[in-house]
Image: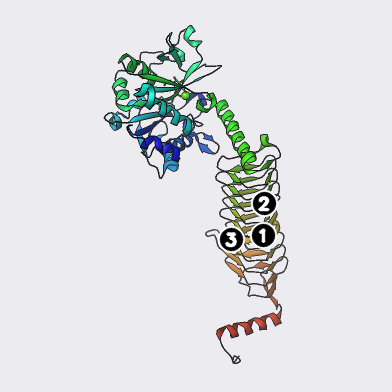
Amino acid sequence: MEKQSQFQLQEGHAPLDVMILAAGLGTRMRSRKAKVLHQLGGRPLIAHVCRTAAALTQRPIHVVVGHQAELVEAAVREELDEHGAVFIKQEEQRGTGDAVKAARDAFAQTNSTLLVLSGDVPLITAETLGALIHQHRTHRGRGAACTILTVRLEDPMGYGRIVRDEEGLFQKIVEQKDATPAERQIKEINAGIYCFETRSLFSALARVEPHNAQGEYYLTDVPEILKSDGEDVSVYLHADAREVSGINTRVELAEFERLLRQRTIRRLMLDSGVTFIDPLHTYVSPETQIGRDCIIYPDVHIEGATIIGDDCEIRAGTRITKSRIGSGVTVKDHCVIVDSEIANNCTVGPSAHLRMQTKLEEGACVGNFVEVKKSRLGRGSKSMHLTYLGDATIGEKTNIGAGTVTCNYDGKNKNPTVIEDNVKIGSDTMLVAPVRVGSGSVTAAGSVVTKDVPPDTLVAGVPAVIKKRLNENKEEQRGEEERLKDGALVTQPE
Ligand code: UD1
Ligand code: CA
C-alpha cells in the first residue's frame, strides 16, 4: 500500500485516476448474470479489481456499469465503501471505446493519468500496474500518451494482437475478428489494460469509428490514432500471462479459482506453517488466516475472512465461513460453522452446525448432530449429542443431555433460554422459551420445562414440576455468604 501511494505523490506527475470497465454482459459465460458478478475466491470478480485499484490512488475509482448496473454498483460499493467510487452508466454496450467515452464529461478536461482496467481481469497485482504506470511516466524521459500492457501467449486466439513495425515499435492493435491470417500469427496480445494521458485519450476517442467486423467502438483504436497525432505510444510487455489474462468463460473461471486456491494454500504452508493433508482437495479463501501447526484435512472449505489460531485440527468435510477460531481447537468431520466464534481448546463435531454469532467459550464442547444458533456456551460446558440450542445463553460447566431442544419459536417470536452455571439438563429435555434454569439445577430426562427453574432444584415431568431442592446445605451456606456481603452482622429475622 505504502509503496503504491508513492506513484501519486511523485512530484512532477499528473495525478492518477483509475477507470474500470464493467458494463458488458460477458456473453461467453452463458449466464443471465453479468460476468463481473461471478465469484472468484468467494468475491465477485469486480471486487478483486476494485481492491487492487484502491491500492494505487487515493482518488475515487470510476466504474463504467451497464448490464445489471445496480448489482454491479452494490458489489463495488461493498468493496470501496471507504475509498469511494464514481459510477458511469453506459446505456448500450457499443464497445470498449464507447464505454470509456461514457465518462467524457467526468474526465475530458482533467489533467491526469488514467489507468484503464477491465472488470474481468481479477488477478492483476498492484505491483504490475505500478510498473506499467512507472514506464508510462518515464518513457523516453518525458512520458508517453499511452502505454499498453501486453503479454505473449502460446495460444493468442480471441485477443487483440500487437502489431509492431520492422524496428519493433508499436504500430497498432488489431482485434482477432479483424486480423489478417499473418496478423493472427502474432503471439503478443493486448491485455486490455492501459495508461493514458487523460486529455489525449478523450481527444483521440472522439475520432474512433465503428468500422470493423463487430461494428463496435474499439478502445484499441486509440493508440494508433495517438501515434498518428505524433504522440508517444509505449508497450509494457509483462512476463506473467496468467496474471493479466481476463476471464471469458466458466472454464477460465474454474482455472483461476484453482490458481488462486493454490497460491493461498502455498502461502499458508510456507509462511504460516500449516499442514495440508491434501492441498489439491482443500478450499481456502485468500482472506483466511491460519496459525502455526494447524492440520487441515481434505475436503475442508474455509471461506471469507476466517481466522484460525495455532495448533488446531480441522477434519475432513468441514466448512467454516467468516468465523474466528482460537488455538488448540479440534473440529471433527463434517461440521458447518458460520459467523461464529470458538475460543481456545474447544471441540466441535463430528457433524455439528454452529451459526449466527454462536460463541463457544474456552474448553466448551459441541458434539454429534448438535445445532447451535445465536447462542453462547460458557467455559467448559458441553452439549455432546442430538441437540438444538437456539437463542440460548449457557453458563460454565453445564452439561446439556442428548436430545435437548430449546423450543425458542412460539410461531411468532424467537424467545431466549438462559441456563446458568453447573446445570445438568437431562436427556430429551424440552426447554420452552422464554425460560431460565438456575445454577446447580437438574432437569430429569424427558422433562418439558415451561417455567423458570430456581437454582439448585430438581425438576421432572410434563410439564416439569419441582421434585426437590438439591444441596440444602449449600443453599444455607449461600444465604450466609449473601448476608455477610450485605454487611449484616446479626441473624436475619426469617
Ligand atoms: C478486449 C480488447 C482486446 C483484448 C482483450 C483482453 C477491445 C476492442 N478489445 O477484447 O484487444 O485483447 O480485451 O481481454 O477493447 N465493456 C464495457 N462496455 C462495452 C464493451 C465492453 O464496459 O461496450 C467492458 C467489459 O465488461 C469488460 C471489458 O470492457 O470488462 C472488456 O470487454 P470484452 O468484451 O471482454 O473485450 P474483449 O473482446 O475481451
Ligand atoms: Ca475480455
Q: Quick check: 158 above or below 138? A: above
Q: Amino acid at mark 3?
A: Asn
Residue position for label 2: 352
Q: Amino acid at mark 1?
A: Ala
Residue position for label 1: 364
Q: Are marks 3 and 1 in contact (CB under 8 Å)?
A: no
Q: Earlier in the sequence, mark 1 or mark 2?
A: 2
Disc 2: CA contacts within 10 A as few (<14), some (14-19) or many (>=20)? many
Q: Quick check: 461 above or below 271? A: below
Residue 206 seen anywhere in this rendered image of the structure: yes
Q: Which mark is residue 408?
A: 3
Give the alpha-carbon distance from disc 1 to disc 2, as whole Å. 13 Å
Q: Earlier in the sequence, mark 3 or mark 1?
A: 1
Residue 77: where, in percent of width, then height?
Answer: 42, 41
Q: Quick check: 345 above or below 120? A: below
Left or right, 277 with respect to 143, comes to right
Q: Quick check: 462 above or below 12? A: below
Quarter of the figure with residue 490: bottom right
